[in-house]
Image (spheres, grey):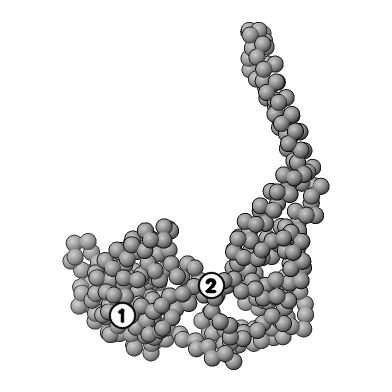
Amino acid sequence: MTETLDKVLGYIGDSDYAAELKKKVSESIERCTSWTDLFHSLVHETFKDDGLVIFNSHLESVRELEVPMMQQIFKKHKEIDDAFKSGQNEFLKSVNKAPVIQTDTNVHLFVNATTVRSLLTEAKDGSGYILGDKNLSHDEVLKQIEESPAEFSNNVVTRPLMQEMLFNTAVFLGGGAEVSYWGELHKVFGAMNVEMPIVMKRMEFMHVDDRISKLLKRYELMLDNSISEQIEEQKKTLIKTHTNDEVINEIERVKSTLEDAFKPLYEHADEYFKSGIIDGNKKRHMNELDYLKKRYSVDVKRSLRQELNNLDELSEKLMPNGALQERLYHPWQFAVSNWDYSPLSYTEKLTVIKS
């Protein structure tokens, strides 16, 4: 972990701010003994003054608290499975998207959570339950939940259900994929008579520095969710306005003329003057003309190198790989002056942080 930390800081560069961060994170790495502990430590250090509550759902005491809930989920797994499948189909038809949840199980619980967890599955003939190479009865599963709750955990379908049974919340905020995920589960809550919270997409942020602001103004681009498409369109327009269509058309005309010019040669093909030789010669000429067209396009782009580089910079800084900055960039890459967690009013619009 310390080596990884050094690599991250190596990419970001030295600064008093980075040195302070390294000291705090190094202390957490030395103190913590598991990934969970380290995650808690880092998140707490960041939000310790903002009232964030961190809950470890895998604590044994929590698993004991979940026993009656886990047993109830198991008893009603058929209703839950039916509700999930029908609700998912209904939701996907309404939004016309591919499913986020993909699972073939029918009980939606894991066992052996402290070692190598395995899905619990009901036998197709309804004779019992399969766990690896073991066969368990309905009562044996209930007893195992009672005696060894730490060995059980929820799968992708029942996890939000258990979450709401433990902490009944008013609103769940998540990313786009999480909102779809909860949408596919909307009928599952009804199967357990649990109120589903309001599900809302969390706010999205984008950092814009002075250079980015100047480039946006220079190319007359609007900073919104369509910025990637705007940049690509600007590049195409730039190249098109500097490309002489007559040159391209003339090259294509020469190719067509060449095709016609070779036709008489085929009429003289014989055992000494074979058509294969004619094909090869014609192909070389065609390749040269294709190269001429390609080279012209390359030279046009070279003449616009600075402009195209500016537009690529905008794209890479604002929407790297077509996604929000948070999907690719590390928070430490942004100036410490922007680390302000003041309360903001909720909005579905992109929130821009300027420096």
Q: Name the residue under label 1.
A: 194
Locate residue 334, reporting x and y percent. 70, 75
Above or below 268: residue 17: below
Q: Distance between the residues labelled 1 and 2?
A: 27 Å
The answer to which of 16 and 251 lies nearer the viewer is 251
Residue at screen point 57% across, 90% down:
50
Where, by quadrant of the figure, is residue 340 drawn? bottom right
Amino acid type at image mark 1: Val
Q: Name the residue under label 2.
A: 348
- Residue 248 in view of the camera: yes
- Between disc 1 and disc 2, whose residue precedes? 1
Above or below 125: residue 150: below
Q: Is the C-beta separation of discs 1 and 2 under 8 Å?
A: no
The answer to which of 153 and 269 lies nearer the viewer is 269
Residue at screen point 62% across, 65% down:
224
Where, by quadrant of the figure, is residue 100 drawn? bottom left
Residue at screen point 38% across, 61% down:
94
Where, by quadrant of the figure, is residue 70 drawn? bottom left
Amino acid type at image mark 2: Glu
Locate residue 344, reporting x and y percent. 58, 83
Locate residue 3, reporting x and y percent. 67, 75
Would you call the spot at circle 1 few (<14 residues within 10 Å), some (14-19), or many (20 or more)?
A: some
Above or below 101: residue 50: below
Locate residue 291, reporting x and y percent. 73, 34
The answer to which of 248 and 146 lies nearer the viewer is 248
Q: Report whether 36 appears left or right of 21.
A: left
